[in-house]
Image (cartoon, helix red, strand yellow):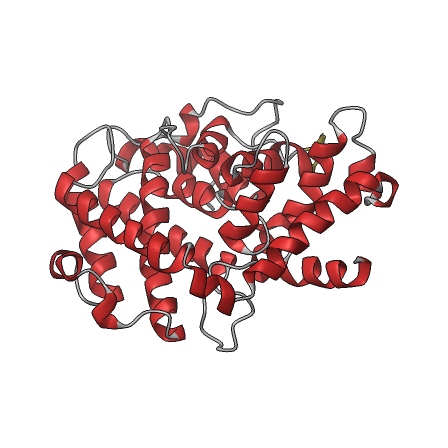
Amino acid sequence: MKKRSDIERIEREILGEFATKASSSKGREIYEEEDDIRTCFQRDRDRIIHSKAFRRLMHKTQVFLSPEGDHYRTRLTHTLEVSQIARTIARGLGLNEDLTEAIALGHDLGHTPFGHNGEMVLDEIHPSGFRHNVQSLRVVDVLETGMFGRGINLTFEVRDGILNHTGSGTPSTPEGMIVKTSDRIAYINHDIDDALRSGVLKEEDLPSDCLNYLGKTHRERISRLVTNMIENSDGKKEVFLDKEATMYMNKLRKFMFASVYYNEEVKKAEDLENVENAIRFLYNYFLNSFKKLPEEYRLMKDSFSKEELVKDYVAGMTDRYALNLYNELK
């Protein structure tokens, strides 16, 4: 039987020079005895998978709301695709797959219902704004419960990767850097796939220069970007795509924001005005009727403002629950 100490020894022997070894972790905010079998990063992965927030991702929108087809992505399938891409890159570079997987599985735990549209509304109405990466960290630090009460006491490296998977921050580990780029690789390409399936986009709409460089199919583009990242980062402390691949990926991302994510026709077809109204209504309703907020949130009123707790509750809802509650209360 392989014990944790055996796994840590194998990591030190076979992982690359710049890999984050479990035995060298900066640790947890609250000290815990180590597990006999699992490394600290494996434990973090398991805590994330068994969290309520992770289960709710199954019923949260990626891009398309309540699609009629069976094959559209949800926030959960997006998370799994990010994990797969990130682990492939980590393995190719001799980095820590367990840490990479834990960050990838936890990176979107704080996402709102209704995808980025829900995030935009909460950012607009919540006094201190809203960023899903900050909320994801709050989920694992405060809102989920573990053996010490609030929070599931993840390691510094996983928390850092979750917080810095998007935005201007730079992850402190190469594994976190992998997840940051893998998130973009995943959502740009699978959202193109879903947009083509839904009829929002046609093949000829996609920027031809991007397709010529990155590939004309979903499979080709992901393979090209993964290979580029491995080849460009081999033997280096930082992990990133080369300049040309980055340019074309960012151009494709910009195209998707203009043509799909912020497209008014898509907004109308997906009835996004209604779901945005639902977020506004629920936030204001529970702010004005705080006693109707679930007890688990009200119990934290001495530590956090009403606005913060209402935001937590609304952000944690699934699409279906939010719409049903909105229709019930309005």
Q: Is residue 195 left or right of residue 218?
A: right
Q: Where on the picture, by quarter, is residue 246? A: top left
Give the mark count: 0
Drawn side of residue 320 relative to residue 36, left or right: right
- Res. 139 in view: yes
Above or below: residue 25 compared with residue 284? above
Q: Is residue 36 left or right of residue 262?
A: right
Q: At 81% from the left edge and 44% from the top edge, which residue is drawn?
A: 293
Instruction: Examine the image and state in which quarter residue 272 appears.
Output: bottom right
Occupied quadrant, residue 176: top left
Give whichever of 56, 189 is nearer the camera: 189
Q: Residue at x 23, y 41 (%)?
A: 93
> Can residue 51 be seen at all in this image of the molecule?
no
Q: Residue at x 50, y 46 (%)?
A: 108
View extreme (bottom): residue:
69
| Residue 174 % position (x, y) | 31, 33
x, y percentage for residue 116?
49, 50
With 31 as the anchor, is 265 left or right in this view? Answer: left
Rendered view: 251 above or below 270? above
- Percent position (x, y) of residue 268? 50, 65
Query: Which residue occupies the foreground of this view, 251 or 133?
Result: 251
Which quarter shows the C terminus?
Answer: bottom right
Residue 235: x %, y % from top left:
16, 33
